[in-house]
Every structure is written in C-alpha cells, then in structure tokens.
C-alpha cells in the first residue's frame, strides 16, 4: 500500500503556490496508484481527498470522503476529513455534525476534538470550544498538536476576556515549543489587553525575530507603540507590515489611525479608505475611519462608519463607546446613553463606559444618576482622575460643595491638572472655606507660561478679567476664560456680571467642553 500521510491538518507555509500544486499532484498520482491496487481500502480515498482539499478542489475532496465513508461507515477518520472539507466550504454546522460522528465512533480521536473546537471558536461559541480543547489536551496529543491546542484554547479564553488563563496556555505552548512565533504573538495580544505593554512589546519582538516575514505581527506591535504615544515607531511598524503584505487591511487601517491622531487627515483618509477597500467585511477599518472622522469633527460621517462597524461586529464595545461619544458631542445625550448602555451590557467591567454614561447624565442635568455611574467607574478603576473630576462636578452642580471639594482633592492627588486645581478651589470657596492658600500651593506644580495658569492668577488677584481675556489666544481658551470669569464674579456676588460671562461661554464653547455644560448648569442655578 502506497501512502503519503498528509494528516488532517495538512498545510505547507511559505511554499510558492505552483510548487505546492505540483507536489500535491504527485501525491494524488501516488494515491491513484494505491487505489487501483486496493480499491476497497478507505484510507486511500481519505488521503486523496485530503490532497484535493489542500488544493482547494473541495467537490473532488467530498467525493473521496463520501466513498471512504461508504466503504467503512465506522471509520472516524473519514468523518474528520469530511468535516474539514465542510469547514473549508464555510458549512460549519455540517462540519460539527461530522466531528460529532467521528467522536461517537472514536471518543479518543484527538483531531476530532481539536477540529470541532476550532469550528466552535470560529462561531464564537467559546465555552464549547474550550471544552473540546480540554478534552484534546487530556488525551495527551503529540507535541505539535498540543502546542496548537494550547494556543487555540488561549485564544478562546482571551475572547471571553479571561486573559490570565489565556496567558497560562500561551506559556505552556512556549514551554513545549520555544520557537513558536504564533504563541509569542498571542501572548503579546493578551498582555496588551491587560495593559502590560512592556511585556507585549517583548513578545512581539520575539515573534518577529522568529518569523520576520509575518506582516500581522508588525501591525500589532505598531498598535501597542501607538497606544504608548510613540507614533513614529508605530508608523515604522505599519510601513514594515505593508511592505511585507501590500494587501494587509489591518496595517493600512492602523497607520491611518496613527496619521489621524497626528492631525494628518489627508494621509489618514487615504490609508483608511484603502483598509476598507481591502477588507469591506471587517469592522475594524470602518471603526478606525469613523474615529478619524470623529477627530475631524465630521460627526455624521463618523456615525455612518460606526453604524457599519457595529453591523459587522455587534459585540465590539469600542464602537458603541465611540459612537456614544459622537452623539454626546452632537448634544444627543439620550442616544449617547443608549450606546453606553449597550457597551456596559457587553462589558460590565468597563470603567470607561460608566464614566462616559455618567458624563452624559451630567449633561442632561441628572446629577444623581451621574454620581451613581461615577461611583461604579471608580470602583472598577479608582486611579482615573477624570472620573473623580466628573463626580466632583456633579456634586458641585447639586450644590454639595463639600463632597465636590473632596472629589477634586482626590483627582489632584492622581494627576497634576490645572483645571482640577481650579475646581477644587471653586468648590472650597463656594462651600464657605478660604481656598486661596491651597490654590497658590497647588499652582506651584504647574508651568506658569502655559494655559490655564492665567485663570489661576485671576483667582489669586494677580490678573484682571480683561487681562485674562487678552491672554486667551485660542478659541477654546476664550471659551474657558468666559466661564471662569463668570465663576470669579459669582464668588464676589456679582450675579449679573456672572450671568453675562456664563452666557458668553454657553454661546461660544463647543458642546463637548465641560465649560459648556458647567455654564448651562450655573445659568440654571441662577434661574436664567
């Protein structure tokens, strides 16, 4: 019997397609000869079917597998192989049926469990996938299969955000095969998801060292560099990815996002459009292009792309968060809250979702609900100064100045921010305390030549309102100057002058500026 054992997971990476095709043709000729010699042996048909499947001739593969099953309906290998063909064809349900049958006939068939786990994972049925991988591992597969199984189970754990277990699986895969680039890349992904970016970069470095032709790893490392603020290194990695794979939609999309964060919208849109064109059924390019539109202030185009991203991937938390932010920027806080609700439903541990929803409730004047959301966000991430500032403002608008001052104090402990320092001062003064000495001490942590230092000097009687307005050179600075001058007048009991400046702030400030929302809250308090 002439046998070429290609195995059920046959693949050859890096071979030119014409050479691979010629190799498979020679293999098929060998099986032709074997079947002529022994036409009732199902293994020959299975093996020839695997070769046809590897060539992409799926219909011919099915004919071989069907014949093998007809000759020996109790042979699990035929069902495993046909299941792989169904999976190649995109018929995952029938693939699972064949793997079920194979396992029924041979409960110790490692390939069947691994293959069925892979199909469940592709269907996002992660719990079922993990059970199948567990079973395969318990059967003690040979090392190459074990490595892939640990990597795939780690991927399933990562998909349900159990990154600790995912990392343990990747550790085991690397222990078994220290030169497995996929395991390093996957572990890097998990570290990145845990915000352990130094470890992520080290693992991406190692993966690239092991497989320097893999464009995708360059793109992933570039994303980490971008998240750490090193956009030059990020763009270098995206360039390297595109150089290795000119059709890599992920690399174009990520590079476009990097250009957008630098304000280079022309180059950003070229790359982002290319990403969408290369992979129009992938949500990520639409999500990234939406973010670029969002940065440009083109809210309608941003929403249109977020809509498409959500249509393609309805479980993507970031798309809901960002679309909610766009609606909030448009002043449509009810629709923003709907998106934040959906983000929280998908990820109840997302502190950002609670923070953003709190901001939306604050903008609607529903300060009680805002404080509830800020409390939850702080419970999930107590180290985010923005959340403490949000809670402080909500208490401030309620007139609970003592609680506001405490919240701003915590924000100031976490970050040096001129605005937090000013709000802490305002809360103390409105609560009946003298905050000038503390304001002066806190201001020493800031750079005198930078905005908003002139606002602090206003409250320390070192500048007049007119001087502050003359120093406000940018539109956003003029918006802020009007609001804080209004607060300065309120501290002096000048309600009419305060109302004039607060109304000016409401008129000129962008709707997503906190000073815009604060001006409206103060005008409501003044019954104006």
Image (cartoon, rainbow, N blue to C red):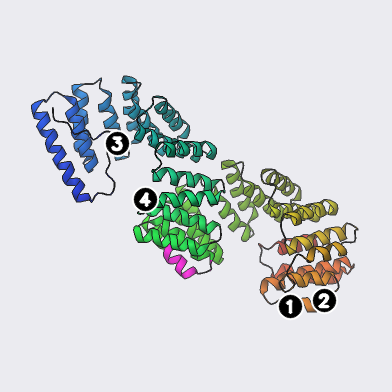
> Residue under circle 4?
211
The residue drawn where x is 58% and y is 46% is 343
> Residue under circle 1?
471
Is residue 387 in the magenta section? Answer: no
Q: In this view, does 72 lie above or below 282?
A: above
Nearer the observer: mark 3 or 1; the answer is 3
Q: Earlier in the sequence, mark 3 or mark 1?
A: 3
Q: Where is residue 354 in the image (x, y as percent from the top left)?
A: 65, 47
Q: Nearer the viewer, residue 113 or 186?
A: 186
- Report the Cα–Cα distance between label 3 and label 1: 69 Å
- Report the Cα–Cα distance between label 4 and label 2: 61 Å
- Dot 1 falls on a residue whose secondary structure is helix
Q: Earlier in the sequence, mark 1 or mark 4?
A: 4
Assign the magenta stretch its main secondary structure: helix
- Report the Cα–Cα distance between label 2 and label 3: 75 Å
Quadrant that contains the C terminus: bottom right
- Report the Cα–Cα distance between label 3 and label 4: 21 Å
The range drawn in magenta is: 262-271
Q: Does the rendering let one see residue 281?
A: no
> Residue under circle 3?
9
> Residue under circle 2?
463
- Report the Cα–Cα distance between label 2 and label 1: 10 Å
- Dot 2 falls on a residue whose secondary structure is loop
CB under 8 Å between discs 3 and 4:
no
């Amino acid at each position: 019997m002439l046998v070429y054992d290609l195995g059920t997971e046959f693949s050859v990476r890096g071979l030119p397609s014409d050479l691979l095709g010629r190799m498979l043709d020679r293999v098929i000729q060998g099986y032709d000869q074997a079947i002529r010699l022994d036409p009732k042996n199902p293994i020959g048909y299975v093996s020839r079917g695997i070769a046809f499947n590897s060539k992409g001739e799926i219909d011919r593969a099915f004919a071989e597998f069907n014949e093998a099953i007809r000759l020996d309906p109790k042979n699990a290998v035929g069902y495993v192989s046909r299941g792989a063909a169904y999976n190649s064809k995109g018929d995952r349900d029938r693939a699972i049926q064949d793997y079920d049958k194979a396992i029924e006939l041979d409960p110790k068939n490692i390939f069947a469990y691994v293959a069925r786990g892979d199909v469940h994972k592709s269907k996002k049925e992660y719990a079922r996938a993990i059970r199948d991988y567990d079973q395969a591992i318990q059967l003690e597969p040979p090392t190459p299969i074990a490595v892939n199984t640990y990597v795939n189970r780690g991927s399933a754990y990562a998909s349900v955000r159990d990154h600790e277990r995912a990392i343990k699986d990747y550790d085991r895969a690397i222990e078994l095969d220290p030169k497995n680039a996929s395991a390093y890349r996957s572990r890097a992904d998990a570290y990145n998801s845990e915000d352990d970016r130094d470890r992520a970069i080290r693992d991406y470095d190692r993966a690239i060292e092991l497989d320097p032709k893999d464009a995708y790893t360059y793109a992933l490392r570039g994303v980490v560099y971008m998240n750490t603020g090193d956009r030059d290194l990020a763009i270098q990695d995206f360039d390297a990815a595109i150089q290795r794979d000119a059709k890599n939609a992920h690399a174009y999309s990520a590079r476009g996002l990097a250009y957008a964060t630098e304000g280079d919208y022309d180059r950003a849109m070229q790359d982002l459009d290319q990403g969408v064109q290369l992979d129009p059924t992938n949500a990520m390019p639409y999500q990234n292009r939406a973010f670029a539109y969002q940065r440009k202030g083109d809210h309608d185009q941003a929403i249109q792309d977020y809509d498409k991203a959500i249509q393609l991937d309805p479980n993507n938390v970031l798309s809901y968060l960002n679309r909610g932010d766009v609606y909030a920027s448009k002043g449509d806080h009810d629709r923003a809250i709907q998106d934040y609700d959906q983000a929280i439903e998908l990820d109840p541990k997302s502190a950002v979702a609670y923070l953003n929803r709190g901001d939306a409730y604050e903008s609607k004047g529903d300060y009680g609900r805002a404080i509830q959301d800020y409390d939850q966000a702080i419970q999930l991430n107590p180290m985010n100064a923005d959340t403490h500032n949000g809670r402080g403002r909500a208490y401030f608008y309620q007139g609970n100045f003592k609680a506001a001052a405490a919240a701003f104090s915590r924000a100031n402990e976490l970050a040096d921010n001129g605005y937090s320092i000013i709000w802490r001062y305002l809360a103390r003064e409105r609560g009946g305390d003298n905050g000038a000495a503390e304001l002066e001490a806190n201001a020493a942590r800031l750079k005198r030549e930078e905005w908003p230092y002139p606002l602090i000097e206003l409250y320390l009687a070192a500048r007049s309102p007119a001087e502050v307005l003359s120093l406000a050179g940018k539109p956003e600075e003029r918006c802020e100057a009007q609001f804080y001058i209004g607060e300065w007048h309120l501290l002096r009991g000048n309600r009419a002058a305060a109302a004039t400046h607060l109304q000016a702030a409401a008129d000129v400030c962008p709707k997503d500026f906190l000073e815009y929302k604060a001006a409206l809250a103060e005008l409501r308090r003044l019954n104006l």
